[in-house]
């Protein structure tokens, strides 16, 4: 659905999208260096693209994105591909939870619009009814302009134990559809969740907020003055890097590592909530994708090259190989080209424990896909031996790798699609399809794509050490030297 300006309110809102986290409960598709917000899990667009599109157009300023350094090029490229220009991309030196990120964002907005209303959103939520979201947004904006800190409360559909709850209080005078917050409730057990549903007036805590920048900073200053001081210093000492603004690491590390709820909302008298039913899901685990997916007559959600028999109420997804499932019920089966997950649907979230074990064992499957994305394109491992490695490298049109050299490996390049410009020592030459070259160990070199179509090469590395850290960058378009 195309976004529209928030109903009943024509003043500009300032969207801020928080794009952090590794999405470990959605492994093997979501991994630390390419997590769930960058994947098309629920639609043809990725979740960060869908989030930005909901708040693009009249009534909204260009979105401000807060992410970590490892994801900066993914954010920039995915927004570019979606035709959405960001108002800025702020890079956090480290994850400090949502309160410091919100404080930096509020300070950034307040520089040019002190009374501007910030709409703070995670990048990895699904919202099926965008019109209902915009209607709630308009109500929240009116409440925010009265100095209130507003959260969006989701009308519960069942007794869910995976979400925090909000108890709605008295209606807010003069802002129909908004309520004072009576109290916040941590994730309940099953009996308590069922009681909340019977009693009524309890809402799921969505983690989406609206507040005037100045009002939020006032409350943060009252409750955590050291964090506001540190966040302001991190922003004032920030350095530009291409299209990114890199927050200063030392002061940012002095901020309080708390969520907005724990830092502010549970302690302020300004808290308000707007109840809304908008087809919301935070896609926290594989079961959520079964909840929101289109099911066949056997209750299965099937994605990709999948064949089933005598299988019921399962989520089965293939990102490549044929996956066949026989005689299973209430299960999750997810296959990528280098890993397979099989679990009962109600226990699939425990996969995060597997990811922790993979990382503890320093296995790459915990953090990396077999296809690794870079600002210039991507590479994919094809084969690996004791003294050799084979990769497929794709270079985007007009892009180029860094000017570099290796101490421990030589490389053979074979062009299979497109045209390559090769720098090798003092030489510079073109290679076309079915042509190849050799880069001796220790030779300065660069690979470029001068064409308008993707360049695809097969690279064979040989030598005693083949790690990615054996790259000495001498010059780099993307500021990685």
Image (cartoon, grey):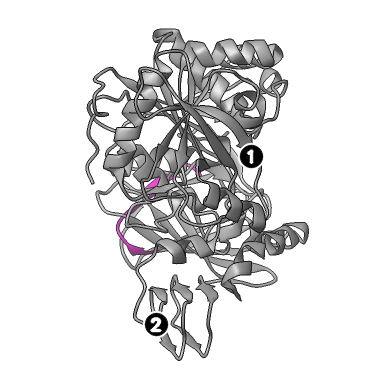
Q: Secondary structure at mark 2?
A: loop
Residue 380 showing in the rendered view: no
Point out residue 112 in the picture as x, y percentages from the top left corner.
40, 9
**Residue at x-position 45% and y-position 55%:** 157
Q: Is 132 within the magenta? A: no
Query: CA gap, disc 2 to disc 1?
Result: 37 Å
* Residue 272 picture location, percent across and down: 49, 25
Within-10-Å neighbours for mark 1: few <14, some 14–19, many 20+: some
Foreground pick, 463 / 361 = 361
Q: Quadrant of the C terminus?
A: top right
Give how far across and how far down residue 234 sits, in percent. Answer: 61, 17
Q: Residue at x 65, y 47 (%)?
A: 187
Residue 185 marker:
1
Between residue 360 and residue 444, name the one nearer to us: 360
Residue 214, relative to residue 376: is it above or below?
A: above
Q: Position of residue 163 (x, y in %)?
A: 58, 48
Q: For the magenta stretch, what is the residue range?
A: 415-428
Question: Does residue 182 sit above or below 248 in this rendering?
Answer: below
Which numbered dot is residue 298?
A: 2
The residue furthest front is: 199
Q: Is residue 419 magenta?
A: yes
Residue at left offset 57%, top offset 20% = 103
Residue located farthest toward the right when viewing the structure as drawn: 360
In which quarter of the view is residue 290 placed? bottom left
Closest to the observer, 315 or 381: 315
Q: Look at 27% across and 39% down and name the residue there.
A: 83
Q: Earlier in the sequence, mark 2 or mark 1?
A: 1
């Amino acid at each position: 659905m195309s976004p529209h300006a928030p109903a009943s309110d024509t003043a500009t809102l300032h969207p801020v999208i928080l794009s952090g986290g590794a999405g470990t409960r959605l492994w093997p598709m979501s991994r630390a260096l390419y997590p769930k917000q960058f994947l098309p899990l629920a639609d043809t667009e990725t979740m960060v693209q869908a989030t930005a599109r909901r708040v693009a157009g009249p009534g909204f300023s260009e979105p401000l994105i807060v992410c970590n350094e490892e994801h900066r090029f993914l954010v920039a490229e995915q927004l570019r591909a979606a035709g959405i220009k960001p108002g800025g991309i702020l890079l956090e030196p480290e994850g400090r939870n949502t309160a410091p990120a919100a404080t930096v964002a509020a300070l950034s907005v307040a520089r040019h619009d002190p009374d501007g209303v910030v709409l703070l959103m995670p990048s990895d939520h699904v919202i099926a009814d965008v019109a209902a979201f915009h209607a709630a947004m308009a109500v929240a904006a009116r409440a925010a302009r009265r100095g209130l800190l507003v959260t969006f409360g989701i009308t519960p559909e069942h007794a869910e134990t995976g979400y925090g709850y909000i108890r709605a209080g008295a209606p807010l005078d003069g802002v129909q559809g908004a309520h004072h917050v009576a109290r916040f409730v941590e994730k309940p057990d099953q009996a308590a969740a069922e009681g909340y549903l019977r009693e009524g007036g309890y809402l799921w805590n969505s983690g989406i907020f609206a507040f005037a920048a100045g009002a939020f900073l006032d409350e943060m200053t009252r409750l955590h003055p050291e964090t506001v001081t540190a966040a302001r210093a991190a922003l004032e000492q920030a350095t530009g890097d291409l299209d990114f603004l890199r927050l200063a690491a030392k002061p940012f590390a002095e901020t309080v590592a708390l969520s907005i709820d724990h830092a502010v909302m549970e302690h302020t008298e300004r808290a308000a909530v707007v109840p809304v039913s908008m087809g919301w899901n935070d896609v926290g685990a594989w079961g959520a994708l079964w909840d929101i997916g289109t099911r066949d007559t056997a209750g299965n959600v099937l994605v990709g090259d999948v064949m089933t028999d005598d299988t019921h109420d399962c989520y089965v997804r293939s990102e490549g190989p044929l996956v066949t499932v026989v005689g299973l019920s209430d299960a999750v089966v997810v296959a990528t080209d280098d890993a397979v997950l099989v679990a009962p649907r109600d226990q699939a979230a425990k996969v995060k424990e597997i990811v922790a074990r993979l990382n503890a064992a320093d296995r790459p499957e915990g953090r990396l896909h077999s296809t690794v994305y870079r600002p210039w394109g991507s590479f994919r491992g094809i084969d690996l031996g004791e003294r050799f490695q084979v990769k497929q490298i794709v270079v985007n049109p007009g892009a180029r790798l860094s000017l570099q050299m290796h101490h421990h490996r030589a490389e053979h390049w074979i062009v299979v699609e497109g045209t390559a410009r090769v720098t090798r020592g003092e030489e510079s030459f073109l290679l076309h399809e079915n042509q190849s070259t050799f880069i001796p160990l220790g030779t300065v070199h660069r690979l470029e794509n001068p064409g308008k179509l993707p360049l695809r090469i097969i690279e064979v590395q040989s030598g005693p050490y083949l790690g990615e850290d054996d790259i000495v960058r001498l010059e780099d378009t993307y500021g990685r030297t």
